């Protein structure tokens, strides 16, 4: 009986130990419920550019293009017999026009560059989806080409320069006309001063004799 | 003759039991030292904590997992155990995706309505379910995961074996005394 108890105790101990070992060997796994997986993740990606943006840019480019052309056509030209005053007014107008033209061309360039940048970015993407970018860019390219063909900034500069030259010539001529008159006036003025000085001198000498006479009378 | 056979069988069983215990102890120690999951000849034992794979295996059962030599070779329909964040999950493959040589698996629990929202890279796969399962054993083993249960499981056999040893020594001493007297 005692032997059986002893054996039972040992067996129980060994069983307990093996159970512990078994528990240590066993890991855990989940067969998790994931009903939320029914909602599939939706991939949202923003487009690089939208058709409205390209449309807006093209619209702005067209407005600027027409402004540039109309402004370029209004470049004033001075008449051959224009006066100095008229020439100065014309050159002022040309300078203002040049500044406005430069500003408009700069604005157009910005829009054109923006469109080119969009085209560059969509080049590796689906060409069908971004067809509107290519079309918009082509339109801007055409406008840019027309501006380059039509607007000759060099000719405006030349006109500016020629009017400046004319103004300088006219100013020189005016100076030459004014100079002889001035010299004559100057001569007149100096003569007059000399005469006045002489007159003053004679009056003074007369005064002195009268004084002498007076003193004589008193002595008498 | 029958008695001898019985004695031999008992001895063989107890020896095997002790050998098995020693083997288990060795596996536990080696896995603790290496920091890896304990495995027996390439197989891991896992207790199932939830029921999305019912009726293939029940919640609270233990299952065996064969560790994968090449985790890219699993096919649609295989049940795999994989690492997802800090959990191990066992689900069935419903689709295999191969993108530029990078294999990933789409999984679903048999008892779930829809597929899992993740795709499992082949690197995260630990192994596949072998089909071996013992229902409810996981519950019992799960109890021992607590520190108290572990301490008790070590204390009880220790106490019993110590008592047994003391008893044997006392018995031997008495026997010696009797013999001397």
Image (tube, coloured by chain):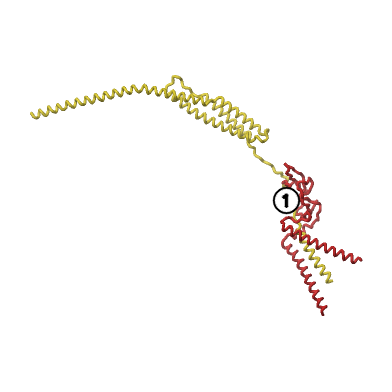
Chain colours: A yellow, B red
Q: Relative to B92, does residue B149 appear above or below in the rendering? A: below
What residue is drawn where x is 74% and y is 47%?
A: B122
Of all residues shown, which one is farthest toward the left? A220
Does residue A19 appear to the left or right of A134 in the view shown?
right
Residue A127 image-quadrant placement: top right
Query: Which quadrant would residue A107 be assigned to in this image?
Result: top right
Residue B155 is situated, as x and y percent measured from the top left of the image, at 74, 66
* Quadrant occupied by the N terminus of chain A: bottom right
Residue pointed to by mark 1: B83
Q: Residue at x 78, y 62 (%)?
A: B22
Mark 1 secondary-structure assignment: strand
- Give the residue at the far bottom of this rendering: B181
Taking the view exactly as shown, the residue that stands out farthest to the right is: B1
Q: Position of residue A15 (x, y in %)?
A: 79, 63
The quarter of the image holding the C terminus of chain A is top left
Q: Decide which of B99, B141 is in the foreground and name it.
A: B99
Q: Residue at x 16, y 28 (%)?
A: A208
Chain to which mark 1 belongs: B
In the displayed structure, A7 sits above or below B28; it is: below
């Amino acid at each position: 009986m005692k032997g059986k108890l002893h054996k039972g105790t040992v067996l129980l101990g060994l069983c307990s130990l093996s159970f512990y070992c078994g528990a240590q060997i066993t890991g855990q796994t989940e067969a998790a419920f994931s009903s939320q997986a029914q909602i599939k993740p939706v991939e949202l990606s923003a487009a690089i550019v939208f058709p409205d943006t390209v449309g807006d840019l093209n619209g702005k480019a067209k407005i600027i293009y027409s402004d540039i052309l109309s402004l370029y056509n209004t470049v004033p030209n001075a008449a051959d017999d224009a006066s100095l005053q008229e020439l100065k007014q014309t050159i002022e107008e040309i300078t203002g026009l040049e500044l406005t033209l430069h500003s408009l061309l700069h604005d157009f360039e910005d829009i054109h560059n923006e469109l080119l940048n969009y085209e560059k970015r969509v080049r590796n993407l689906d060409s069908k989806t971004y067809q509107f970018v290519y079309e918009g860019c082509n339109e801007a390219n055409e406008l840019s080409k027309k501006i380059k063909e039509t607007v000759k900034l060099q000719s405006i500069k030349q006109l500016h320069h020629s009017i400046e030259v004319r103004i300088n010539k006219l100013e020189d001529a005016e100076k030459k006309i004014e100079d002889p008159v001035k010299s004559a006036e100057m001569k007149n003025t100096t003569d007059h001063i000399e005469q006045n000085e002489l007159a003053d001198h004679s009056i003074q000498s007369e005064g002195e004799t009268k004084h002498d006479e007076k003193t004589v009378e008193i002595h008498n | 003759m029958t008695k001898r056979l019985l004695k031999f069988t008992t001895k063989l069983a107890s020896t095997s039991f002790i050998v098995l215990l020693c083997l288990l102890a060795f596996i536990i120690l080696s896995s603790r030292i290496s920091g890896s999951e304990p495995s027996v000849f390439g197989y891991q034992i896992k207790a199932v904590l939830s029921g999305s794979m019912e009726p293939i295996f029940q919640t609270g059962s233990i299952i065996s997992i064969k560790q994968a030599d090449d985790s890219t070779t699993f096919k649609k329909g295989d049940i795999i155990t994989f690492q997802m964040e800090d959990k191990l999950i066992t689900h069935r493959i419903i689709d295999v995706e191969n993108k530029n040589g990078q294999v990933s698996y789409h999984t679903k629990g048999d008892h779930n309505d829809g597929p899992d929202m993740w795709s499992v890279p082949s690197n995260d796969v630990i192994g596949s379910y072998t089909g071996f399962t013992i229902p409810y054993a996981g519950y019992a083993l799960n109890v021992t995961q607590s520190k108290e249960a572990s301490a008790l499981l070590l204390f009880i056999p220790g106490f019993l074996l110590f008592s047994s040893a003391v008893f044997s020594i006392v018995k031997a001493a008495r026997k010696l005394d009797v013999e001397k007297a």
